[in-house]
Image (spheres, grey):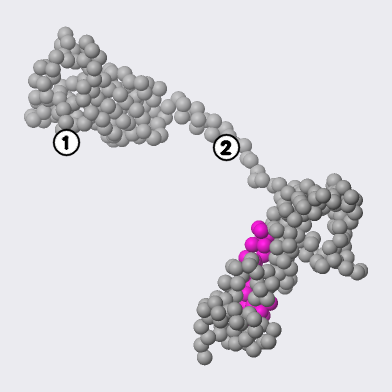
Amino acid sequence: ARLAGTTSSRSANSRIKSMTPLGRGETAEAADYAAVYLDYVIDCYPPKSVTAYFLLRLVDKVSNDLMDPPPDDDVRAAAVHEFSAGQNSWGYYAFWKKDELESSGRIVDDVLTIRCDVGVVGRYATAKTDAAAAAASVASSVHVPPADLGHQLGALRSRAVGADVTFQVGAGSGARRFGAHRCVLAARSPVFEAELYGPMVERDAGRVIRIDDMDPQVFDALLDFMYTDALPGMRKRDAVAMSQQLLVAADRYDLKRLRLLCEHELCKHVNKGTVASMLALVEQQRPSCQGLKKACFEYLRKTPKVLREIMATEAFDHLVNELLSSNKLAIRE
C-alpha cells in the first residue's frame, strides 16, 4: 500500500509518495481555493491501515524558500491522519486562496510547486519491517529453555565432583560429614568467604571444619539453598521447626534471602500452637524478623484469649511487656 501522487518525499522507503493535484474544490465556498489531498493506494492484501504525518509548504522556484499556508483554524501545514481501506483520502478542500497564490509570485510558467514531506507513525508494512517480522518468525521457532543453573549446581553438590572442603556437623554419634566447594560457599556467604579464604586458610587447608551447634539436617538444607537458591522440600509436620532453625542458620551465615524465605514460610503458620515459639525466635534474632513479629502481633490482636494465655506464662513476661508497650494490642474482656 502507498500514499500516491506526484511529489516525492524522503519517506520513499515506506512507499509513501505524495498527493493529488490542486483544484479539487468540493463546495461552492471552496471554488476560490486550491485543494490538496493525499490518496492512500492499496496494493496489498489484506489491506493495512497506516498513520501518516505530512507537512505541506509552497516552494519558491527561485530561492527554494518554503512557505507555510496562512494561519487558519481548519488548515494547518502539518497534520496526522490514519488512512485505511474505508478512508483512503484526506486533505484540505480549501487549502489556499487562488488569488493569493497568483499574487504571491510563486507560480512560475503556470506551475506551482508544493513540497509534501510524509512520514509514517507507528507500524507499517515496509521492506524493513517485513524483514524484521520474518527474522522474528524464524527466531520464534527456536525454543530457549529457562535458566537451570540452580538445578545444575545442585547436581554438582550431589555428585561431590571437585569438592574441596569438608564439614562435620553435629555432636556425638549423630554427627555427619558434608563435602562442598569453597568457591560456591564464598560467593554466597560473606561469613563463609572470611572463614574459607581468610588469613588462616593455608594453615587450615585440608582440615575438617567442625560445627557442633547445628543439626546436620539443618546444615544439609542450608547447603541445598546455597547451591540452588531455593528452599528444600519439607514435610508439612516439620515445616515450622525446620524453618525456625534454618532462619537462625541464615542469620549466622548472612544469607538474607534465605532468612526472608524462612520468615515468609513461618508467617503462614502463625497459630495458637506456634505463636509463642515464634515470638521467642523474634526476640532471639532481633533486630531481624520484623515481618514475623508483625504477623504474631496481628494474630494476638485478633485472638485476645491466646494473648492472655501467653501473659500467664512466666517465661514470656518480657515478651508481653514488649507487646503492651508497642501499643498495638487491644485486650478485650
Q: Position of residue 134 (x, y in %)?
A: 52, 30
Which residue of the protein is positioned furthest toward the front in this rendering? 199
Magenta stretch in the rendered image: 256-277
Which residue of the protein is positioned furthest toward the bottom in this rendering? 333
Front residue (pair 118, 88): 118
Q: Which residue has dot 1 on it? A: 73
226 left or right of 102 in image? right
Residue type at numbered disc 1:
Asp
Regarding residue 228, the answer to whether it shows in the image is no
Q: Position of residue 29 (x, y in %)?
A: 8, 30
28 left or right of 240 in image? left
**Residue 117's quadrant in the figure?**
top left
Residue at 27% from the left image edge and 27% from the top image edge: 55
Regarding residue 7, the answer to whether it shows in the image is yes
The N terminus: image quadrant: top left
Among the two numbered marks 2 and 1 on one chain, the one whose residue lies closer to the N terminus: 1
